[in-house]
């Protein structure tokens, strides 16, 4: 608390005359003491023209070496009656048996008698700093004699100590006569004085003393030496006693800060705390500023320079309340420019007017620098990147790589700052370069987040759902994790990218190669806003497979939804499942470098024509379909991977002729390959099935089948059956023909006549394609003009005859 001043005169730095009044405070113990508190003994107030002896605890600031006893009084104050270490206080005008005694001119209403009931010492514990020079000033007056002086010592330490440090001895009579000039000791400087220089018999003494002891809290005060009458209970009046080193000051805190919008800092600005006596005229505390904040851009001082002075007015400061604290004047410049966290560092510069030292612990290091952090409430939250390579991979790290640029998705994106209740705090469009800036963000908001949306938010309303424009996808989440606006926020980045587009592909008409041969698929292609043209070396997803062909990549069958990376057009082929004229289609989606696929796949179309007529193909399969009168209806699969003695053994490559991969009608190939054991006289029926399986039409088709050895052709096997095929009427019919049917469509004669069939007896000359005729041969012309000039693809039928076992 700052003491009230009256009549202050300055000698060099020291006090020549002063009346100091300090109000009581309970907080003093928190701070060091550098000057006398209650120097004029004005507190508490006891009345007028009276005296009182009270325990030291009632006299603010003061302690005594007096022994404990019950005090006396004439003052009409009842609450001070208990026994204790007494201090005696007089009020002006009290007689005391030696005439009325008044205070010095303008010295208040109360003063102390050093000799209460014995020679004692009045003192206060002050923080003294090694090698400092201290000033003092006090009023002294004798009580009982105008010719013989009362004498008192001024000292550091207690008079009862073995070696107290006495700086001066003072002798004053009751009318203010100085019987001996002050005796200076231990380096003190005490000027000579004149009689009654303070009026009413009082003499003001002052001077300076050097302190060479260790830094610490020391008792400083006045001790009675003698009285005029030799009675130690009467003498040595004291008033306006002050002993003070230079004031001590430091910053109250090492740091503080607030939002930029607080242009006149009030939340926790840097403050100086001062403890001690500041002389008339006050003192100037030089302050320098530094730090990352820029003077004139981020803040300004009253002098507009990086150094300025804080004026501390005259007063006695004990550090206990706001009067001992001085706020550093400066202003923060608020703007809409994101600048991040900036710090101003205020530093106390050295001066001869004060000590920079701890105000709470005597001699400890002071807080000479205090930083003030400007928290930018206009912060750049981040940037929306066109993450063309998906480096973010659904995280908020490594979003930007290479030459990727910022984007606002065609001007359709908004960044929205949302509070913990999902209400919009701030909303702003994303700039063309992908950046977004929130201005004047509410400070110290917890658990906020930022979302991207095509819908602008409305402050105070529920936030819209995160969203992106059509054909854009996110590579990072569209909502950040929660954070606190107490610090500046940077790099709240997002990753988005555009989807690719796949081109429909129509191949030129190509001849169906037939069989297991493959056709190269026309080159796949597409475009991507970030990657440009897509083709060889890029990735494509085969969304659906062709229904009439098998797709291969590098010789391996492709599966649905397979992604082909580092695509090589020469390696993608298709094997048509049907020989002849067909159209093969499948769908494909381009995949960009971010791994994102076209959501609308394109179609690949491949028209194929049949092979020319010069490339027909005919499959023949022979079966035993009847023994005697028993029809054989089994369906067997000829195989080459069984024992040659097996009933279904057929040597490769004819073992696949009866496979279902050929277009035989279902259950058409009935009969056995090996009928087992037969005996002479048994009748066997042989059926030769035929299938046109080439890409072109088969013409001039003739079938010759040699009658098996050990059997005899039965020429009358089908006599009397119709229809016939133009043969001689009444001629034997030993051959049956089926064209596109599972039952015979004509019965042929054995003779060379007008129908398609003929039987050649053994050793008779046969067409060259029959081979050696050693047991007879059945020859049938399948095609015939004009009714069946050729066999189209998938045309089927059979030739049948019977033979008897010899």
Image (tube, rainbow, N blue to C red):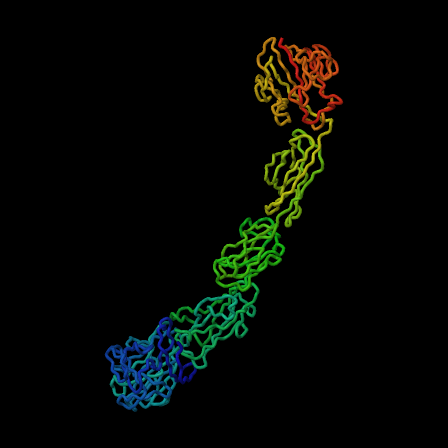
Q: What number of labels is visible?
A: 0
For the residue pair 86 and 1, the one nearer the viewer reads as 1
Q: Is 342 positioned to the left or the right of 607 in the image?
A: left
For the residue pair 137 and 494, the one nearer the viewer reads as 494
The quarter of the picture where residue 110 lies is bottom left
Q: Position of residue 326 (x, y in %)?
A: 45, 74
Q: Is 57 positioned to the left or the right of 635 in the image?
A: left
Q: Which quadrant: the C terminus?
A: top right
Q: Position of residue 232 (x, y in %)?
A: 25, 84
Residue 568 visible at all? yes
The residue at the point 60 percent across, 10 percent down is: 682
Q: Is 310 positioned to the left or the right of 142 in the image?
A: right
For the residue pair 480 and 108, the one nearer the viewer reads as 480
Q: Position of residue 422 (x, y in %)?
A: 50, 57
Q: Is 633 positioned to the left or the right of 764 in the image?
A: left
Q: Residue furthest left?
A: 70
The quarter of the picture where residue 66 lies is bottom left
The residue at the point 43 percent across, 71 percent down is: 250
For the residue pair 648 and 162, the one nearer the viewer reads as 648
Residue 553 visible at all? no
Residue 804 to residue 342: above or below? above
Q: Position of residue 167 (x, y in %)?
A: 35, 80
Q: Which quadrant: the N terminus?
A: bottom left
The residue at the point 68 percent across, 11 percent down is: 774
Residue 295 to residue 578: above or below? below
């Amino acid at each position: 608390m700052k003491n009230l001043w009256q009549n202050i005169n300055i000698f060099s730095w020291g006090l020549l005359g002063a009346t100091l009044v300090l109000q009581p405070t309970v907080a003093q113990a928190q701070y060091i003491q550098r000057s006398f508190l209650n120097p004029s003994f004005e507190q508490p107030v006891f009345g007028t023209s009276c005296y009182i002896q009270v325990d030291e605890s009632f006299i603010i600031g003061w302690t005594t070496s007096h022994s404990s006893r019950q005090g006396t009084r004439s003052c009409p104050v009842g609450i001070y009656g208990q026994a204790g270490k007494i201090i005696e206080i007089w009020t002006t005008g009290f007689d005391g048996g030696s005439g009325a005694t008044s205070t010095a001119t303008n010295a208040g209403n109360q003063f102390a008698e050093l000799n209460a009931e014995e020679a004692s010492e009045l003192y206060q514990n002050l923080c003294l700093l090694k090698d400092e020079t201290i000033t003092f000033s006090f009023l002294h007056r004798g009580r009982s004699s105008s010719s013989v002086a009362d004498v008192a010592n001024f000292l550091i330490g207690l008079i009862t100590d073995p070696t107290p440090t006495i700086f001066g001895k003072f002798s004053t009579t009751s009318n203010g006569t100085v019987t001996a000039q002050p005796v200076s000791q231990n380096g003190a400087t005490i000027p000579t004085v004149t009689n009654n220089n303070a009026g009413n018999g009082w003499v003001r003494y002052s001077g300076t003393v050097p302190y060479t002891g260790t830094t610490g809290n020391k008792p400083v005060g006045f001790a009675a030496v003698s009285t005029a009458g030799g009675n130690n209970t009467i003498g040595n009046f004291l008033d306006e006693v002050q002993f003070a080193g230079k004031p001590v000051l430091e910053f109250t805190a090492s740091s503080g800060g607030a939002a930029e919008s607080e242009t006149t800092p009030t939340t926790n600005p840097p403050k100086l705390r001062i403890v001690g006596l500041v002389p008339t005229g006050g003192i100037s505390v030089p302050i320098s500023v530094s730090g990352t904040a820029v003077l004139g851009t981020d803040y300004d001082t009253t002098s507009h320079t990086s150094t300025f002075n804080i004026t501390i007015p005259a007063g006695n400061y004990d550090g206990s309340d706001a009067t001992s604290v001085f706020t550093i004047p400066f202003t923060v410049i608020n703007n809409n420019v994101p600048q991040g966290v900036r710090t101003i560092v205020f530093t106390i510069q050295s001066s001869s007017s004060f000590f920079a030292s701890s105000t709470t612990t005597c001699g400890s290091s002071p807080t000479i620098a205090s930083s003030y952090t400007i928290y930018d409430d206009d912060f750049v939250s981040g940037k929306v990147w066109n993450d063309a390579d998906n480096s973010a991979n659904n995280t908020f790290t490594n979003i930007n790589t290479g030459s990727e640029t910022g984007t606002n998705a065609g001007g359709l994106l908004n960044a929205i700052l949302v509070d913990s209740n999902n209400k919009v705090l701030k909303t702003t469009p994303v700039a063309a370069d992908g950046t977004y800036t929130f201005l004047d963000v509410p400070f110290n908001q917890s658990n906020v987040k930022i979302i991207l949306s095509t819908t602008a938010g409305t402050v105070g309303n529920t936030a819209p759902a995160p969203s992106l424009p059509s054909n854009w996808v996110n590579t990072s989440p569209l909502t950040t994790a929660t954070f606190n606006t107490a610090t500046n926020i940077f790099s709240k980045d997002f990753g988005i990218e555009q989807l690719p587009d796949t081109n429909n592909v129509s191949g030129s008409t190509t001849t169906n190669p037939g069989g297991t041969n493959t056709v190269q698929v026309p080159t796949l292609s597409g475009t991507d806003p970030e990657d440009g043209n897509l083709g060889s070396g890029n990735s494509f997803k085969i969304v659906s497979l062709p229904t009439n062909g098998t797709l291969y990549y590098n010789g391996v069958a492709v599966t649905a939804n397979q992604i082909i990376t580092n695509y090589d057009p020469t390696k993608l082929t298709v094997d048509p499942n049907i020989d002849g004229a067909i159209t093969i289609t499948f769908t494909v989606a381009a995949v960009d470098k971010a791994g994102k696929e076209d959501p609308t796949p394109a179609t690949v179309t491949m028209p194929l024509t049949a092979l020319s007529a010069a490339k027909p193909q005919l499959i023949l399969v022979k079966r035993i379909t009847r023994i005697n009168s028993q029809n054989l209806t089994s369906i067997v699969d000829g195989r080459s991977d069984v024992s040659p003695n097996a009933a279904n053994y057929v040597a490769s490559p004819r073992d696949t002729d009866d496979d279902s991969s050929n277009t035989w009608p279902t259950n058409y190939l009935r009969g056995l390959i090996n009928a087992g054991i037969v005996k002479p006289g048994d009748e066997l029926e042989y059926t030769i099935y035929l299938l046109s399986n080439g890409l072109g039409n088969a013409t001039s088709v003739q079938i010759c089948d040699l009658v098996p050895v050990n059997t005899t052709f039965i020429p009358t096997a089908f006599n009397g059956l119709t229809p016939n095929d133009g043969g001689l009427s009444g001629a034997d019919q030993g051959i049956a023909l089926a064209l596109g049917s599972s039952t015979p469509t004509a019965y042929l004669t054995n003779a060379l006549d007008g129908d398609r069939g003929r039987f050649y007896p053994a050793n008779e000359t046969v067409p060259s394609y029959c081979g050696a005729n050693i047991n007879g041969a059945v020859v049938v012309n399948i095609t015939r003009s004009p009714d069946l000039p050729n066999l189209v693809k998938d045309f089927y039928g059979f030739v049948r005859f019977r033979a008897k076992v010899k």
